[in-house]
Image: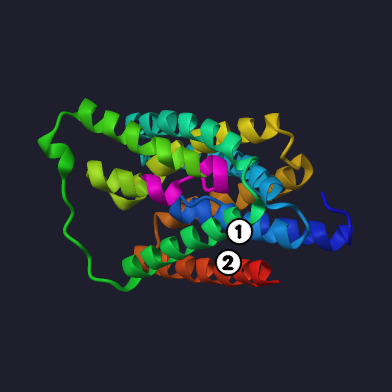
Amino acid sequence: MVKSQPVLDILIIIIVGVAVGALTGMTGSSGVLVVVPALSLMGFTFQRSVGASLLVDVITTSIVIYVYLRKHSVYVRSGIFMGLGAIIGAQIGSRVAVSISQHPLEIAFVVLTAVLASQMYRRAFGKPREKKNIHLTMPEMQALLLAFALSIPVGFLTGTIGTSGGIMFIGITMLLFTVPAQKMVGTATLAMFFSAFSGTVGYASLGLIDFTAAVIIGVASLASGIGFSYLAHRTSEKGIYAAIGTVFLVVIFVEMYKIIL
């Protein structure tokens, strides 16, 4: 952990952990959009911030998955197939990340965050689109294999810019399978666990994880993740999407401020 003002740093890190638990528990989103900017502002390099974020995702998703499994809100087979594809992509991405300078990675992070923010606001305020039940026109195994293939590039993004792919896994699930919103979140969280775990192994092998910061954030996110996982089953989807979109906008402004300076 970067040593400047230890007490203040730990307090900030705990608050970040609570926010991560809320994000993952409510929407299945990766904590990267909170963890990376916070740690970067505290003096961590972008790569070390990403490494810590991935370990946090492993800790947080483990308890969130438990809650969703208890609620029977996980399509396990799809989650496993997507997770396996992400494992492959994450190992490739973590190796590529160390050979790329920090600046373009930060720009890519901002672009991705902007895309996700627009998706959140579209879901919150846009008209609902008719869902295409593609899986009805293909065998289940074919849909699962396609989900596996589509998850490889998601894993690559995990390894390079640290997003564990929660929203993207939700997108894949929406495209190929017809399941309730809560089940989409639970399934995406299971896939995200595999993706984050693979990315964590890659970054740990390169010595790019601050375990102290990651564990503090992860522990703080556990209680938060449990509470918000249960709350997600009783909350309006539109309200959740609007709130998360606003968080993403704040993250964009913080990252742009850092890049400009």
Residue 46 placement (x, y as % from top left) = 68, 52
Residue 180 placement (x, y as % from top left) = 28, 49
Which residue lies at the image location 81% right of the left edge and 59% below the top edge? 9
Q: Residues within 10 Å of mark 1 (few under 14, many from 20)?
A: some
Q: Nearer the viewer, residue 240 or 50?
A: 50
Look at label 2 and name its amino acid: Val
Q: Is residue 47 magenta?
A: no
| Lower position in the chain sequence, tag 1 or tag 2 | 1
The boundaries of the magenta stretch are 158-169
Q: Dots 1 and 2: beta carbons under 8 Å?
A: yes
Q: Nearer the viewer, residue 163 or 212?
A: 163
Q: Which residue was labeled with disc 1?
A: 34
Look at label 1 and name its amino acid: Val
Whether residue 254 is situated above or below residue 157 in the rendered picture: below
Q: Which residue was labeled with disc 2?
A: 251
**Which secondary structure class fits the magenta region best?**
helix
Q: Residues within 10 Å of mark 2 (few under 14, many from 20)?
A: many
Which residue lies at the image location 22% right of the left edge and 44% below the top edge? 178
Q: Secondary structure at mark 1?
A: helix
Q: How far apart, in angstroms, are the residues tagged by discs 1 and 2?
A: 7 Å
Residue 42 placement (x, y as % from top left) = 77, 60
Whether residue 15 is situated above or below residue 208 in the rendered picture: below
